[in-house]
Amino acid sequence: MRPLPFAWRSLSRQPARAVLGLAGITVVGALLFDMLMLSRGLLLSFREILESTGYDVRVTATDALPGLGPPIAEARAAARALGSLPEVADVVPVRFGSVSVRGADGRTASVALLGTETRRRGEWRVLRGSDLVEGTEPPSIVVNRAMAQELGAEPGAVVEVATVLPAQPFRVAGVVEFPFETAGEASATVTLDGFARAVGGVAADEADLLLVASRPGHGAEAAVAAIRAARADLHPFSTEQVLERLRQGEFSYFRQVSFVLSTITSFFAFLLVTTLLTVSVNQRLGEVAALRALGFPRRRIAADLFAESALLVGAGGALAIPLGLALARVLDAILRQMPDVPARLHFFVFEPRALALHAALLAGACLVAAAYPALLTARLPIAATLRRETLS
Amino acid sequence: MSAPVVEGRHLAKVYPMPAGPVEALRDVSVAVQAGDYVAISGPSGCGKSTLLHILGCVDAPSSGDLLFEGRPVAALRDHERTRLRLRRIGFVFQRFYLLPMLTAFENVEIVQSEAGVAAAERRARTAELLAYVGLADRAAHRPSQLSGGEMQRVAIARALANRPALVLADEPTGELDDETGEQIAEVFDRVNRDGTALVIVTHNPALAARAKRRLHMRSGRLAPPAREAAR
């Protein structure tokens, strides 16, 4: 009988212990899998959102993240200059602001307002109605679902930006979804001219951010280098560079938490299997000594233990995946309730790498866990054990 | 004349203990020929099991020489001794030590599987051995479904599975009642009659009386009056 079927029989000999062990590995494995999904989940999710806009370079006036530093002056000229670079396919200036908007029924809401040009790529997704257009009177505005619901701002309706006097009317062109909108937060986008009207007193030719799409065949890094060379006063970041900054800064907390918890859960998996196998071996020392006396080599006894460990960890690890995915959905929903988290951002993201790492860590735990009981049986003095077992 | 199956010359075994070394065996010389049937008896702690373990190559003497089929066992490496036990020696234990998760058939088959015997051959041999010990109808039963005597018969079948030259039994009737012990003794008689050398350590006088030679041990030595007493 080969070690694997032999191990299966050994486990089925004490089904309650095997089931408890399996349950333990499954739970620990699920936590491990979740921590591995968390370790890069935010970055993967953030990358997906960034890439969904269709722009792979972001340009700001300083090293600060978009919206957190001073605006770029003479933004239209800067956009034209960057747009003329051979490495650049497209440039769009963006302004950020916060305004108070009154709906047709008199209700008001605080709205995060973006000023930009009409949509060229994936800046937003039209859900109903039509898209943002230039040169209409009153100016056009696209709103997200939260704002539409809060102010009854459906396509065709007129809303007023009440932050300035006199209040400025805007006609709702459509209801859209923005990549970075946060759950429940009202947000809207207008043209740059519309933005100047809405916020009043703010220089019209400024931008908090220039969204740049690199020309196909050149790539983001080439576009960044070209922008740096052309305009040393500007600070371009490729998507990779933005993600790297987030990885080392804002997202590092989750990475560290995930690293610590992954280490702890791997250790728990190791402890659990070691304990189960060691207890099992100690309960059958006489049997092991008898097998050795009958001519079973040490490596066979060790192979049986490794197979037992592999069965426990393999089955538990496999069951851990659906459980981990289900648990991740719950934990993700809880974490996404944190304020200012974009609705499309996820903390736990499945990727094949997490699965491979999960399998590798559990395989490592399985091997290390079986090592001690295997050593125990390999060093077992046959005669002394048989004598002791007979006397006991 | 061919070499004895196993031969111990001036065997001694000393166990280091906190209170000082304990001499379990002192200058014991014994030879077991092919077809021999030897019973070793003596008071508890006199060194019977130690001698049996040394003859079975599961323990090494502190001094003296052990030869198995003429080859010095001390010269063998660990895996060679293990292989020797698997192929040439059978063990029967007081507590049977059958694997509880395997059937009687599988318990007998597994040692042949470990020795690399082909599946068809080992299945035939296993069926033959279970019939030999009178358990053909219990092949599919697990140890928990067998009586003590049945378990010991399975253990004897297991010991014979790889056609060993020598079977060693340590108190094989120690856990059995007299009547069942008698049945086991009869199985041993048959095993010996069929040509396998037997060495049995026992407190059971009825079992010892069936042996061709009876050795008596006292304080780690073979006691002179009973030494090499012919049956």
Image: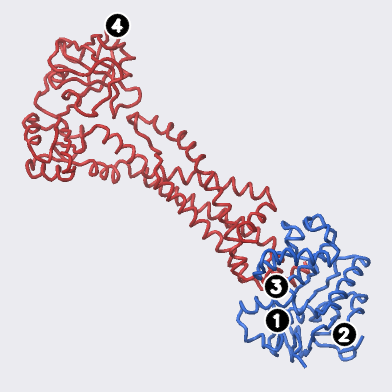
Chain colours: A red, B blue
- Chain letter belonging to callout 4: A
Q: Which residue is mark 3?
A: A293
Q: Are marks 3 and 2 in contact (CB under 8 Å)?
A: no
Query: Camera-side residue: B21 or B198?
Result: B198
Query: Camera-side residue: A262 or A88?
Result: A88
Q: Are marks 1 and 3 in contact (CB under 8 Å)?
A: no
Nearer the viewer's eye, disc 4 or disc 2? 2
Identify which amino acid the numbered label 2 is placed on.
Arg
Mark 1 or mark 2, which is nearer the start of the sequence? 1
Q: Position of residue B119 (x, y in %)?
A: 67, 64
Does residue B95 show up?
no
- Chain letter belonging to callout 1: B
Mark 3 or mark 4, which is nearer the start of the sequence? 4
Q: Which residue is mark 2?
A: B213
Q: Position of residue A305 (x, y in %)?
A: 60, 61
Identify which amino acid the numbered label 1 is placed on.
Tyr
Q: Residues within 10 Å of mark 3 (few under 14, many from 20)?
A: many
- Chain letter belonging to callout 3: A
- Discs 1 and 3 share one subunit: no
- Chain letter belonging to callout 2: B
As drawn, the label of residue A162 is: none
Q: Position of residue B66 (x, y in %)?
A: 71, 87
Q: Residues within 10 Å of mark 4 (few under 14, many from 20)?
A: few
Question: Element at badge 4?
Answer: loop
